[in-house]
Structure formats: C-alpha cells, structure tokens
C-alpha cells in the first residue's frame, strides 16, 4: 500500500533525479527498503524456471536499464525477482546524452528515454557485481561506447565479454537501443555475423550464456534473419525487445504500455519459430503489465519475462499478481511447479 503513495510523491519530481536518489537508498539500505516495500517470497522449487545454462528462481526478472550500475542487486533480489540484468555497460565510462532524458506519460503508463548508455564503465560495474552478496541469476547488458566507430564495435563487445563472462550468469549484446547513433545498424545480418565471429575464440575459452537484444521496430523478415544468425552461432537466445520509436512523441525509446503490442508481435513470432528448441530461448520484455500478458507469451512458446516500466508504475504489486496467477494455475492443474507445466507442454 505504500508504493502508490511513494509514486504519487515521486512523480512530482524529475524522473532521473527520483531514480538516482531512490537507487542510492536501495544500495545503502537494501534490507530496510525491502521491508518498507515488500515483494514476494519465492520458492525456487515451485516457481523456478530452468533453461539451458540458466536457472531463474522466478519467471520474472529485471530488464536492463533499471539498475545500470549494479548497485541495487541485493534489494531487487529481496523483492523476489528471478534474475537481474544490469547495465547497459560500456567499456569506458560515459555521461550519456544531455538532460532531461527521461519523460513520463502516466495516462499511457509509458516512459520515453534518450539516455544514451550513461554508466561508470566496465571496471567499476564489475567491481560492484563482485561485491554483491546475493546469488540471484545475474545478466550483464553490453553496449558499445558512443564514440566507437561502427567498424570497431566488435572490439567493445569483446572487451566487455572478457570482463563479465567470468562473473555473470549470462551476457547480452545490446545492438537495439535507439539512443546511440548507428547502433541499430549492427542488427544487419552481415554486421551481426562479423560481431559474433569476433567473440568466437573468447566464447570457447570462457563459455557463458549469450543473448542478443533486438529492436521491436524490425520487420518480421529482418527478425528472422537475426534469429538465423543467432542459431548459426549457437547463442542461448534473443531478448525481444528493446524500446520502440514513435516519431510524433519525439526522440528516444518508448517503453511501457505503448510498446506492448509492437513488442508482442516480434517476440511471439520468434518464440513460435523456436518452440520446443531446448537449446534456444526467447526472453520476453516490452510492455508487460499484467499476468494475462505473461500468460499470452507462455502460450506462444516463451518462458522468461523481464519488466522495467511496469515496475516503475506498479511497484512490487506486479510481482504479487504474477505469483498469485501462477498459484491459481498450479492449483487448477494440480501441478507442483511451473516447470512441470512447461515440461508437459501445457501452454502449447
């Protein structure tokens, strides 16, 4: 009940200022903040999801962008998230784009951001992760520095892979943010193949689950081309999707309810194409606000979901709705775990 009051007050101030102050408290007082803003108590045996190389204690994780610096991992773990994806991280520290760069649309339950990967750089964020006392599944979202030219982008991703592969459970190649000039060009089949080829030797030396995060504004044909390259290089999967561009709303990526249908089209299509492939996973992100929307993704072949904007608008209530929905489903089907339902192909 406290979160709606917090949101009412917080929404009176600049979004980035509120985010930074709040996450400073999450970092300094994780236990206290989790008691003030309680989440859910998860039982990994009942709610956990296993995929090739990954184990999430709960099917809903934190999308990249919420905890950019890996400072709130303990707090977010205490809330009950199944995985936490930190970043986006770049090799060198960078300030990002000019402020203001986060804009709220409360009536549409959406956000627009023009952030441009502000972060303190790979070494500081790696240090933060090593100091983290929790063992939640950790992903690191990797991006190139703004000033790195396109033909050298693979060098940034290789540097980041070397740094984070030994300390993360999975890594994500972010080539889909709309806020770094030219970044989305790397989604082309030729450039993506070149990028992944540059990682091959290091992947062989230090294996870790590897995903590519794609844009929602791709055609289905282009999304299928990315999928084909990802399968060719034996990646763990794709994360679908990043934020969308809505020209009339201005520059930057739109997240939240306004993104849902665009993202749903891409992720459900891709999930259907790899349905039954235990070696490859589509992680769904983009506009999830309610359990029924997650259920829709499951019915199209997905399993793992990430949220960001819905957590800003709803707080821990969204996690409580999901766990209640899963409990109803398990009781109805007399099943002991959500994994049991997936293994029996209950959803499709």
Image: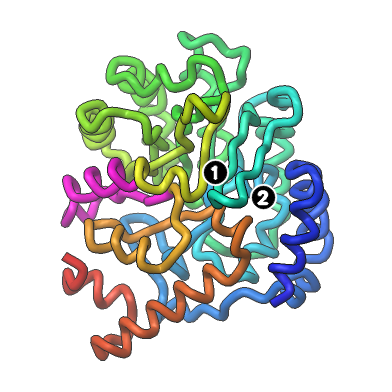
Q: Which of the 4 image quadrants contains residue 131?
A: bottom right
Helix, strand, or loop for circle 1? Answer: strand
Q: Residue at x 68, y 63 (%)?
A: 74
Rendered-image quadrant of the N terminus: bottom right
Residue 319 in magenta?
A: no
Please give the label number shown on residue 41: none
Q: Tell which of 180 and 144 is nearer to you.
A: 180
Q: Mark 2 Cα within 10 Å, few/some/many (few <14, many 20+)?
A: many
**Residue 339 appears at what percent x and percent y?**
30, 73
Q: Where 193 sits versus 34, above or below?
A: above
Helix, strand, or loop for circle 2? Answer: helix
State the colouring used for the structure image. rainbow
Rendered-image quadrant of the C terminus: bottom left
Find disc 2 in the rendering and name its residue.
129
Q: Residue at x 72, y 51 (%)?
A: 71
Find disc 1 in the rendering and name its residue.
140
Whole-Å distance between the Cαs marked 1 and 2? 10 Å
**Residue 101 appears at what percent x and percent y?**
69, 31
Q: Which of the 4 image quadrants contains residue 54?
A: bottom left
Q: Upstream in the sequence, badge 1 or badge 2?
A: 2
Q: Tell which of 269 and 228 is nearer to you.
A: 269
Q: As drawn, is 124 to the left or to the right of 89?
A: right
Residue 243 visible in this rendered orientation of the protein: yes
Q: Mark 1 Cα within 10 Å, few/some/many (few <14, many 20+)?
A: many
Highlighted range, magenta: 264-285
Q: Tell which of 170 and 145 is nearer to you.
A: 145
Q: As drawn, is 238 to the left or to the right of 89?
A: left
Q: As drawn, is 99 to the left or to the right of 217?
A: right
Name the front one of labels 1 and 2.
1
Q: Residue at x 78, y 43 (%)?
A: 14
Whether residues under marks 1 and 2 lie with C-beta atoms below 8 angstroms apart, the answer is yes
């Amino acid at each position: 009940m406290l979160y709606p009051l917090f949101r009412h007050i917080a929404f009176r101030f600049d979004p980035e200022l509120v985010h930074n102050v709040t996450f400073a408290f999450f970092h300094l007082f994780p236990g206290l903040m989790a008691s003030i803003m309680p989440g859910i108590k998860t039982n990994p045996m009942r709610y956990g999801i296993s995929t090739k190389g990954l184990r999430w204690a709960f099917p809903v994780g934190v999308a990249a962008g919420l905890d950019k610096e890996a400072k709130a991992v303990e707090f977010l773990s205490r809330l009950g998230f199944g995985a936490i994806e930190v970043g986006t991280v770049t090799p060198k520290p960078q300030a990002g784009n000019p402020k203001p760069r986060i804009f709220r649309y409360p009536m549409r339950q959406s956000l627009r951001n023009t952030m441009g990967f502000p972060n303190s750089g790979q070494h500081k964020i790696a240090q933060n992760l090593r100091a983290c006392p929790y063992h939640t599944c950790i992903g690191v979202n990797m991006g190139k520095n703004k000033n790195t030219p396109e033909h050298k982008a693979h060098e940034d991703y290789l540097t980041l892979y070397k740094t984070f592969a030994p300390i993360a459970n999975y890594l994500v190649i972010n080539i889909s943010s709309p806020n770094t000039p030219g970044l989305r060009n790397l989604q082309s089949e030729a450039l993506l193949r070149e990028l992944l080829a540059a990682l091959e030797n290091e992947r062989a030396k230090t294996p870790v689950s590897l995903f590519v995060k794609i844009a929602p504004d791709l055609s289905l044909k282009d999304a299928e081309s990315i999928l084909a390259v990802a399968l060719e290089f034996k990646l763990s999967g794709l994360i679908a999707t990043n934020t969308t561009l809505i020209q009339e709303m201005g520059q930057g990526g739109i997240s939240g309810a306004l993104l849902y249908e665009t993202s749903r089209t891409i992720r459900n299509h891709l999930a259907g194409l790899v349905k039954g492939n235990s070696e490859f996973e589509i992680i769904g992100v983009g506009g999830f606000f309610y359990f029924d929307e997650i259920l829709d993704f499951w019915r199209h072949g997905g399993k793992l979901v990430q949220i960001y904007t819905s957590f800003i608008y709803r707080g821990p209530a969204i996690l409580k709705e999901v766990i209640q929905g899963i409990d109803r489903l398990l009781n109805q089907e007399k099943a002991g775990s959500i994994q049991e339902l997936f293994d029996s192909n209950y959803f499709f």
